[in-house]
Amino acid sequence: MKPIRLPRILCALMLIGLSAGLVHAAGEDETAWQTLIKPKYYGDRPIAETAPLIELTAPYRAEDPALVPIQITSKIPQAKDKYIKTITLFIDNNPVPFSAAFHFTPDSGRADLAMRVRVNAYSFVRAVAETSDGALSMTKAFVKASGGCSAPIGTDLEAAMARLGKMKFKLEDTAAAEKPTLAQLLISHPNITGLQMDQISRLIKPAHFVDEVKVTFNGKPVLTAQTDIAISADPNFRFYFVPDGPGELKAEIKDNTGKQFSASYEMKL
């Protein structure tokens, strides 16, 4: 099910009210999660925080708030009788806390991910895993960063738009049939947040970002995702899948303006 998204302006205003004076403090504030995010997305559903099914790795102090590396590692196998079916990523104090929701199948091999995100203020980054039986588990990391969502676009926007939608896959050299294989999808897209100033025109550019990603192998879903403005410019995702033999690894993406792109990789084992 596609996550419900709050209107951007409303969400930003609510977060400003909730976290004023706190988001730049060193204290690890959870106001936004407890009063806005969890009630909106999970209601009263219990979320286990002890012995979580996933581990989140992120820098405590980010070198670049617009390119914060994060890694999510699962602690259970993707077995057919029980597996992680969704991992949802939130950045509490971002203007839009919902960052992405990734959907897996047993054919994913492992529910592991790596990517780069934008962090706009001192905030918890949290990942909520939902298993195929409906149970929820959460892990989190506190990141000190500021301005990731409003960082200037730069002077190469024209070049970025010229390569818009181009994609390629990278696979590990040890890929083998019936074994989890690490893959990386690299996407050329500026992922403009709608909060950034064009360095040349000095105007705020309208939001233009990838909001859907679908990866299949020989037509079978491997990874699908809904993404939002927290995903960095030129998104790249590392993930696993289990090839059952040679075949086509295919990526299809859509952005919030309706543009669609696809790319394929012929895998020979």
Image (tube, rainbow, N blue to C red):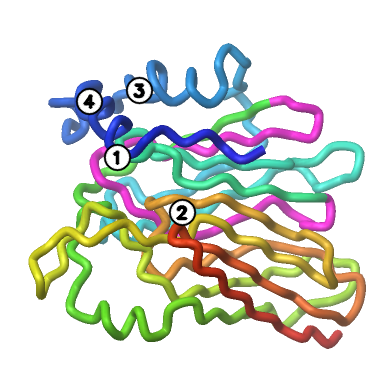
Q: Which residue is mark 4?
A: 19
Q: Which residue is mark 2?
A: 70
85 or 261, which is in the foreground? Answer: 261
Label 4, label 3: how far apart the Cα atoms are: 9 Å
Image coords of residue 122 (percent x, y):
25, 39
Residue 68 vertical position relative to residue 76 in the rendered view, above or below: below
Q: Which residue is mark 1?
A: 95
Q: Amino acid at mark 1?
A: Pro
| Quadrant location of the C terminus in the rendered image | bottom right
Is label 2 in a helix, a strand or a loop? strand
Q: Amino acid at mark 2?
A: Ile
Quadrant housing residue 81: top right
Is label 1 in a helix, a strand or a loop? loop
Image coords of residue 131 (percent x, y):
74, 34
Is label 4 in a helix, a strand or a loop? helix
Count of all numbered marks drawn on residues in the image: 4
Label 1, label 3: how far apart the Cα atoms are: 15 Å
Q: Residue furthest front?
A: 258
Q: Are marks 1 and 4 in contact (CB under 8 Å)?
A: no
Q: Are marks 1 and 2 in contact (CB under 8 Å)?
A: no
Could you tell whether 242 is left or right of 251 in the image? right
154 or 253, which is in the foreground? Answer: 253
- Image depth: mark 1 or mark 4 in front: 1
Q: Which residue is mark 3?
A: 30
Q: Which residues are magenta?
A: 106-135
Q: Earlier in the sequence, mark 4 or mark 2?
A: 4
Q: Amino acid at mark 4?
A: Ser
Label 1, label 4: how far apart the Cα atoms are: 11 Å
Q: Earlier in the sequence, mark 1 or mark 4?
A: 4
Q: Earlier in the sequence, mark 2 or mark 3?
A: 3
| Residue occupying the point 68% across, 78% down | 172
